[in-house]
Image: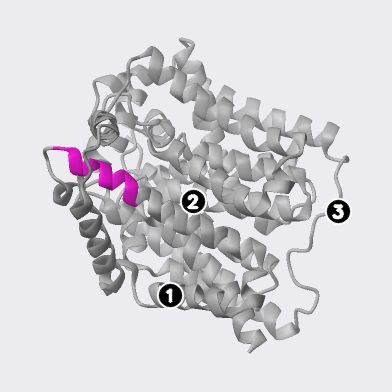
Amino acid sequence: MLTHPLLWLVDILLFTGMWALGCLIVRAILPNAGSLEHIALGYGLGVGSLTWLLFLLSWAGVPLTIPTILLAFFALAAGSLLVRKFLGKRVSPSPRTIPADSSWWQGRLDIAGWALLGVFGFVLFTISVGLSYYLWDAMAIWSVKGYGIGLEGSIFAARQWGSKGIAYPLNLPIAISVFYRFDGDLLPGSKLLFPGFFIALLAGLRVYLRRLNLPVLLAWGTVFAVGTVPLFLQYSMVGYANLASAYYYALGLMWLGIGLSAGDGRRVVVGALLLAFSTWTRHEGLEFWLISILSLALLWGRQMIGKRQALGIVIPALVIGGSWVLFGRFNHAATGETAVLSSALTRMLHGELHPLAVYQILRFTGYLVVRTRVYGIVVPAAVGLSLLATVFSSRARRERLSMTLLVAGLLTGLGVMFMYYLTSYDPAGLEWWLGTGYDRMLFGAVILLATASAPILWKAWSQG
C-alpha cells in the first residue's frame, strides 16, 4: 500500500502533468505567448485534450489502461512539439501582456498578487482533497462514473455507474478515472482537479484584465472579488462541474474577443477550443456555445465573416462537441431534463404560456443578487454600477471587448432563465428546479459580468 506522501506525489505528478501538457498545447498554438498565458489556458486545454482523446480511444474499443493513458499523453505532447516546430515561426508578434507604462511598484504589486493567488490555491487544494466527495452530484455523477470508468477501463461503464447514464459529458469523469487507474484515488487526488479550474480561471482573469491596460491594483482587486464570491469558493472544493464549465466558457469568450479585436487567428483558435471543451464538460454547454456565438456576432460580426476566422471558431466545436453529440445519438443517451425541455417547447408552440413563471424566476434571481452568502456584495454592486455606466458613459460603451463580455453575460443569464422557464412545464414544479441548481447555472454569466464591470467602470471614472 502506498504511504500518504507517495499518494500525494503520484497525484501531484498527474495533476501537474495535465497542466504541463496544456502548456505545451498553448505553446504550439501561441508560440509567442507569455508564461502567464500558458498557466491560465494550459490547465483546461491539458485536461480537456487528454480526456477527449481517451474518450475517442475507448469509443474505438481501446481499454483505458495505464499504458493507454501514457500513450495518449505523450502523443499529445509530441504532436504539440511538432506543431510548434513546423508552424511556430509563422506568427505575428504577440500583443503585449503588460502595459508599457507599468511602474516599478506596479511590478512588485503584481508579484505580490501572484504570490497571494498561489497561497490561495494551496489552501483550496488542501481543503478540497480533505473534504473528499460528499455532495450528491459529486458522488452520484462525476466521481463514481470516473471510478467506474477506471475500474472497467471503458467509457461505457458510465452507463451503470452513478446517475444520468452516459447522457452527461465525460470530461471530468475520465479525468477522475486517470487518478483511479494510477493509485485508486485513495486521497482522493482527483479532487485537485476542481480548485485547479478555479485557480486557472482567476489567473486568466488577471491576464485578460492587464491586456486591457487596467492598473495592477484594479486587475487583482477584480480577480479576488471574483475569487472570494461565497458560492464560487464552495463549489471550487465540492466536486461539481459548474466552475469547470464556467472556466471554459468565460475564458473561451475572452480569448475569442482578444483574437477578433487584434486580428489574431491563433488566439481565435485557442478561444474556440476552450469554448468547444465547455460542450465536453456540462450538458448545457452546447446551448451556451450558441449564446456565445450570438454575443460575438452582435459586436464582431464583420470580423467573424472572414473564412479563416469563421472556420477557426466553428471547427473545434464541430469536432469536439459534435463527437459527443454523435456518441449520445448512437447510444440513445438522454436525461430527464431533455424530456422536460422537449415537452415544454411542444406545449409552448401550442399556445400554453406560463407568465407567472417569469415573475417567479425574476423574483428568485433578485433574491440571489441581494443575498450576500450567494454572490457576495462587491460583485453584484460592481455589475450594477457598470450597467448604469454603460447608459451614461459613451467612453465605456466604446470599449468593445468589455461590452462583448457584458452582452454575453446578459444573454447567458437570459438563456439560463429561459431554460428554467421551460421547467415550469414539468410536474415537479418550477420551485423545485430553481432550488436544485439555478444559482450554479448562472456562474458563467456572473463571471463574465464581473470581469466586464472593471474596465467599464474604469473607463467611466476616467471620463469623469
State the residue position of label 1.
Answer: 384
Q: Nearer the viewer, mark 3 or mark 1?
A: 1
Residue 284 locus on image (x, y percent) = 39, 39
Q: Quadrant of residue 20?
A: top right
Q: Say if the magenta span includes residue 420.
A: yes
Q: Is residue 268 visible?
A: yes
Q: Nearer the viewer, mark 1 or mark 2?
A: 1
* Magenta range: 417-426
Residue at image position (55%, 73%) is 390
In this view of the protein, can residue 69 be seen by the observer? no
Q: Amino acid at mark 2?
A: Tyr
Magenta span: helix, strand or loop, mainly? helix
User: Of the numbered discs in the image, which one, if any, rests on residue 247?
Assistant: 2
- Identify the residue shown where x is 23% and y is 62%: 364
| Residue 461 in picture, x, y percent from top left | 60, 85
Coordinates of residue 205 in the picture (x, y in percent): 56, 62
Q: Earlier in the sequence, mark 2 or mark 3?
A: 3
